Image (tube, rainbow, N blue to C red):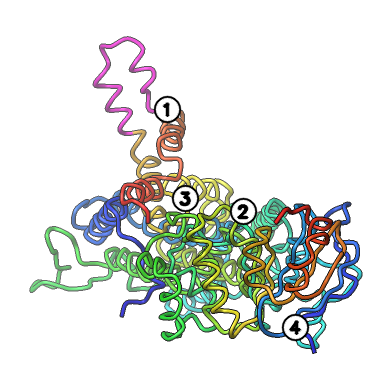
Amino acid sequence: MSNPMTQTPANTGTMMVKGVVALIAALLLFAPFLFQDTRSLEVAARICIFIVLVASFDLLIGYTGIVSFAHTMFFGFGAYGAAILLKQMGPGWTPVILGALAGVGVSLVFAVVIGLLSLRVKAIFFAMITLAAASVVLVLASQLSHITGGEDGIIYKSPDLFKTATKLAVDEDGKVLRLWGVRLNGKLAAYYFVFATSLILFLAMLRFVGSPFGTVLKAIRENEARAEAIGYRVVAYRTAVFCLSAAIASLAGTVYAVWLKYTGPDTALSFSIMIDILLMVVIGGMGTMWGAVIGAVLMILAQYYLRDLMGAAAEATANIPILPQLLAPDRWLFWLGIIFILLVYFFPKGIAGTAMERGAAKGGGA
Amino acid sequence: MSLLSIRNMKTSIGQYAVLHDVTFDVPEGGVFVLLGRNGAGKTTTLRSIMGLWSPSPGSVTFRGQDITGMHTADIARLGIAYVPENMGIFGTLTVDENLILATANGKFDKARLARIHELFPALERFRDKQAWSLSGGQKQMLSVARAIIEPRSLILIDEPTKGLAPSIVAAMAEAFREISRTTTILLVEQNFNFAKSLGRDMAVIDDGRVAHAGTMADFAADLDLQDRLLSLSV
């Protein structure tokens, strides 16, 4: 017999969203072969990591109704954990593993303390406390320059396997082997390290939200008092999910640090990352997990390619009055804002959320 | 010994004192009915028992254990289930998910589930449907089913017939009769005929105080008392 906890009514909206996510997963899997330039690989890796980061944030905001502004703080702990140890100990797997463990450990301590102290208060106070904690950590990262590199951050080397010069396979002449025109070198290994760890973390979260624990979270999100009245301690569950979310964000930070070979306040702790995460989760749809994938892909593609797209559009419309000025690449943030407003207007529950809801409504009730 | 004893319970919501002095005993077995006019304090009494509002002063004792001030979740784990007035289901979860949430270990006792499906066949038919899509009566059935998916000592049920069609009310009465053979029910009800058909013992709350307590048979026979306490014409 199937597990009733994992059963959800299938609908066309859900099928469509899952189809899109499967397509994105396939594109990411073959990204090094499909888009053979450094920038595209950078975008693909960033998408992988942000899918995990946004999905872990969705565990909080979408599945439990907790608004936290400290998510980049946990991301930063993971990134700085690996970065500091890679710098101190040199390239290797030991500093990566120890850095990941340290990042997760510090994140858990912060999450438990913040959670137990403030998850019983009103949501707005919790949000303010997380904002304050994240601000303090950002300032500390900038001030403690002898450890964190201050505003300049830390540059280090990733494990030898991920060096561009590393040959994963060689041909008869001893040169790096090419598969479909792509060099099988350390850069490719680094990308698949990012892809595989992101996939594992995302699948783990998917499994988690489908588990009985995930169902309790959904119940808490819907009505705390009802959940307590059937025997669930809301604060304990909220603290647990806050810890889980923090640990996953921290691991995503470690993976990003290994990929980027640089960690600084701008790449790991800044509030602009927090805003990006919020936008991605809103665009994709809260409480769906699939929404994190769609939101992260759209937002990152817009951040990297909207400017190019607008440049091409401005050129194509050069003979039309006003339009080239409106489409000037420098105005990309303005158009990104317009797109965001339109998305929120037409997809009030995010793209995945709205599509799944409409599909469920068409499917009919009892 | 009573299953549940409430002594001098006073509950305030914000600045407003809703319960002034509520004292009554619920004996083990059968249906105990709490009657009263709108706003008399019946729902507040149930919520105070569940720890959703803290009575101060006053005490709530369950099987001899003082549960005053205990956390709601801990009270629920003692074997007290609560079926709130507004049905209290989780609309975004499926029927089965709603039920399994209330199980002790996340697994169904197949025999109990089969009994529930026998009592409320709609819940078997729509077990994979999200609860928001159920009709009002089906939502009420789900709410009651969730209370009995595990063995309980006491079920607090708040106005289960409110807004339901007569056929559903009759089915609900039959279900409560069946449940009360093994579990004590503390029922808050405005529909006096429904309450009369089920109740063995009863109390009337008026303006936050217990105005009368006794057997349902005696109360049903005393039309003057009914008229005075409930303003009912039966």
Q: Is residue A146 above or below residue A100?
A: above
Mark number for residue A260? none
Magenta part of the chain? A308-329
Instruction: Check whether the beta carbons of the residues at disc 2 and disc 3 lie within 8 A of each other.
Output: no
Q: Is residue A347 above or below residue A59?
A: above
Which of the two discs, 1 and 2, labels the residue nearer the N terminus?
A: 2
User: Please, what secondary structure does the residue beneath circle 1 have?
Assistant: helix
Q: Residues within 10 Å of mark 2 (few under 14, many from 20)?
A: many
Q: Could you say where residue B58 lies in the image, as x and y percent from the top left?
A: 89, 72
Question: Do callouts 1 and 4 point to residues on the same chain?
Answer: no
Q: Amino acid at mark 4?
A: Pro
* Gap in angstroms between the C-alphas marked 3 and 4: 52 Å
Q: Amino acid at mark 1?
A: Asp
Q: Residue at x 70, y 77 (%)?
A: B200
The answer to if B92 sits in the magenta stretch is no
Mark number for residue B27? 4
Q: Chain of mark 1?
A: A
Mark number for residue A281? 3
Question: Do callouts 3 and 4 point to residues on the same chain?
Answer: no
The answer to whether A256 appears left or right of B146 in the picture is: left
Which one is in front, A195 or A260?
A195
- The residue that mark 1 highlights is A330
Which of the two discs, 3 and 1, labels the residue nearer the N terminus?
A: 3
Question: Do callouts 1 and 2 point to residues on the same chain?
Answer: yes
